[in-house]
Amino acid sequence: MASRTPSFLGTGWSFPPTFSRALGGVAMVSDDVDIRESLWVLLSTSLGERVMLPTYGCELRQMVFRGINTTLTRQLQDYVQQAILYWEPRITVESVTVQQTASLEGQLTIDIAYVITQTNTRSNLVYPFYLDQGSIPVQGP
């Protein structure tokens, strides 16, 4: 791909990875988009899934098929906050809210409000979590 000025917030592969024969490389993302996609990958990765980084990821998948109650929502909040604390130093989490989706039974939404530390920019990510299915969705942000 074309050379770019390095971003002080980071640059990484797009998610899902996109390749271009015409430009001869991998599509890259930077700044707040890179942070957003990094969060999506972090929440979609189970602990132990990455051989070289066994502590990378979030324990969301072990909560599939559990009943929706206050204990579950609090555990999900804790897992998300811990994963971000350990693996995404570019942001500060303001809040993590877990709510049941009214239109889809068995789906929770995890709303993460955060501040990008270096730019003091506020943003949020809404991550769908399905309790009735065996896997977390693969589509990106």
Image (cartoon, grey):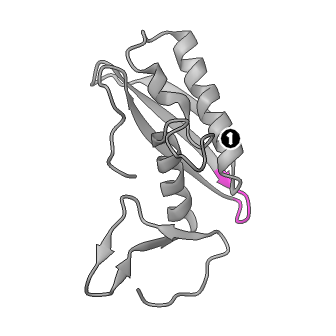
- Up-down relation of residue 91 to residue 129 (above or below): below
Q: Looking at the magenta stretch, what is its main secondary structure?
A: loop
The answer to whether 36 appears left or right of 87 in the picture is left
Quarter holding residue 77: top right
Decide which of 29, 113 is in the foreground and name it.
Answer: 29
Q: Is residue 118 magenta?
A: yes
Q: Is residue 132 magenta?
A: no
Q: Residue at point 42% right, 12% down?
A: 66
Q: Residue at point 63% right, 47% down?
A: 114
- Up-down relation of residue 27 to residue 125 (above or below): below
Quarter holding residue 18: bottom left
- Up-down relation of residue 15 to residue 51 (above or below): below
- Residue at disc 1, secondary structure: strand
Decide which of 28, 91 is in the foreground and name it.
Answer: 28
Measured as percent of width and height from the top left, residue 15 is found at: 40, 59
Q: Residue at point 42% right, 9% down?
A: 67
Q: Please provide the residue range marked out in magenta.
A: 115-120
Residue at label 1? 94
**Is residue 64 something one can see in this rendering?**
yes
- Up-down relation of residue 112 to residue 33 (above or below): above
Measured as percent of width and height from the top left, residue 75 is found at: 59, 20
Which image quadrant: the N terminus? Answer: bottom left
Measured as percent of width and height from the top left, residue 37 is found at: 48, 56
Decide which of 115, 46 is in the foreground and name it.
Answer: 46
